[in-house]
DNA sequence: CAAGTAATCAATCATTAGTTTAAATACTTG
DNA sequence: CAAGTATTTAAACTAATGATTGATTACTTG
């Protein structure tokens, strides 16, 4: 084997990993999987695609060893192949954010349409969340909350929020979070809360970012 | 803009970054660019492709804002768009190495063919290099040495090595390094050195890894 | 074991990406 | 400003990818 053939084989392998990151849908699936294991169908629904497509994308991710599958009876549960994969995804996202101005522009445009622009910046918000000064609200589906959540957070999945408004204080700030900066559940939660006279704000980061910051998580309420 | 459209736009942008990492040749070019700025032609030669292809790949990398171009007279010099890009490339490489067993297998197969298998492991080798116990040899082209090298290293580009063997001690271990684990220059250097009766070993890591370890670099000899 | 459900596979099609070759552009230097 | 060099662009072709649809497999449950 000459050195060119060696290099070609090596970078070919690197390319396999790169190719698996080349599809928007696959990246969205990785983002969702950072919240915890999921079945194929639930991933398909979460990422708005057909079951067959989701299955095909998962096959690609599995070939790159980014995810693992486990069959439990009728369902196949996919999970990230390790916490390094989640950490890498966050690094990838940060690089994209730092390099592609379009991402910030799109986000701003979206948030301008909604009425959720913050009065306080993320850093002080994060401080309030950490100190317990604000009530922290986890609006993700309950299963994801159970997989791990910000300590002291109350679980009220977005779908149940309107029915359970009475559980939330009106005198204290409510800080809602969800899967991360590009998950819109917390945005919608803040809209609902403000419409009903609550002092609400959105924490942009999600549990994976929280953990990557080295902050502790809670697993059971 | 509804939330699906928002997500589609966001992950579309992430996909742009992912797509730029989906080609073996582009990854190899990024690897080379981690050593410092280079012209299109020199990149084309280093990665064994035509000028036109190299130019097209660089266009893709530039569209993803991973590299920047600067025209100096007749030559266009490309460089990484920031040290984050190099750090990210290393993270990408580590993930690939940890997930794809084929990479290690290919590397081992290649090294088995050459006679450079180590008697000592990388960790103790690194210790000897750091302590100055061994003579450290930088066999990359001189320009890359000037961009930054391991403190105390001697620059003898691979092409000049056979002529300059007299400069090297025979009683002390010579540790050669090059661009990184998949650059074969240090492997070839060790072959030459051993053939001439020197005690030689190869340090797998390159300057980018060295810097990422938080170790200091030297810029001028 | 038949019916039903979750997931995968296979075939097709439209789109995109990569390579090659040749032509065009941009700049320098005599 | 003509000749030469470095780079980019364009056109043509081939290969690969992703979405869609329908069929198939694997498993559970009545």
Image (tube, coloured by chain):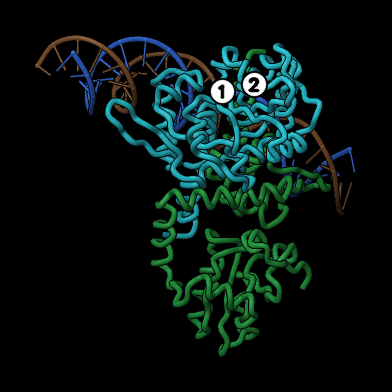
Chain colours: A green, B cyan, C blue, D brown
Q: CA distance from mark 2 to mark 1?
A: 10 Å
Pointers 2 and 1 in contact (CB under 8 A)?
yes
Q: Say above or below: A90 vs A126.
A: above
Q: Say above or below: A124 vs A141.
A: below
Q: Secondary structure at mark 1?
A: loop
Which residue is pictured at 54% across the width and 16% down the height?
Answer: B160
Q: Position of residue B217 (x, y in %)?
A: 56, 42
Quarter of the rendering containing residue A3: top right
Q: Residues within 10 Å of mark 1 (few under 14, many from 20)?
A: many
Residue beneath disc 2: B168
Residue B142 seen by the camera: yes
Q: For residue A35, which numbered disc appears in the image?
A: none
Q: Position of residue B17 (x, y in %)?
A: 49, 42
Q: Which of B183 and A62 lies nearest the eye of the viewer?
A: B183
**Does B14 sit left or right of B151 as displayed?**
left
Quadrant containing the N terminus of chain B in the rendered view: bottom left
Residue beneath disc 1: B156
Circle nearer the viewer, 2 or 1: 2
Q: Say above or below: A130 vs B5.
A: below
Q: Residues within 10 Å of mark 2 (few under 14, many from 20)?
A: some
Which residue is pictured at 61% across the width and 20% down the height?
Answer: B167
Q: Position of residue B28 (x, y in %)?
A: 54, 28
Number of marks in picture: 2
Chain bearing tag 2 is B
């Amino acid at each position: 084997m000459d050195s060119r053939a060696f290099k070609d084989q090596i970078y070919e392998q690197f390319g396999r990993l790169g190719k698996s990151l080349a599809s928007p849908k696959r990246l969205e699936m990785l983002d969702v999987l950072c919240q915890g294991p999921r079945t194929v169908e639930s991933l398909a629904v979460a990422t708005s695609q057909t079951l067959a497509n989701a299955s095909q994308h998962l096959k690609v991710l599995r070939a790159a060893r980014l995810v693992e599958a486990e069959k439990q009876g009728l369902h196949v549960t996919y999970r990230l192949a390790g916490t390094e994969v989640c950490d890498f995804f966050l690094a990838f996202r940060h690089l994209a954010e730092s390099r592609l101005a379009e991402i910030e522009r799109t986000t701003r445009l979206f948030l301008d349409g909604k009425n959720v622009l913050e009065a306080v910046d993320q850093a002080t918000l994060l401080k309030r969340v950490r100190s317990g000064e604000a009530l922290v609200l986890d609006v993700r589906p309950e299963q994801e909350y159970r997989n791990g959540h910000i300590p002291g957070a109350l679980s009220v999945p977005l779908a149940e929020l309107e029915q359970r408004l009475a559980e939330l204080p009106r005198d204290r700030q409510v800080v809602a979070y969800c899967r991360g900066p590009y998950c819109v559940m917390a945005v919608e939660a803040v809209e609902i809360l403000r419409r009903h006279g609550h002092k609400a704000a959105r924490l942009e980061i999600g549990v994976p970012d929280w953990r990557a910051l080295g902050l502790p998580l809670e697993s059971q309420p």
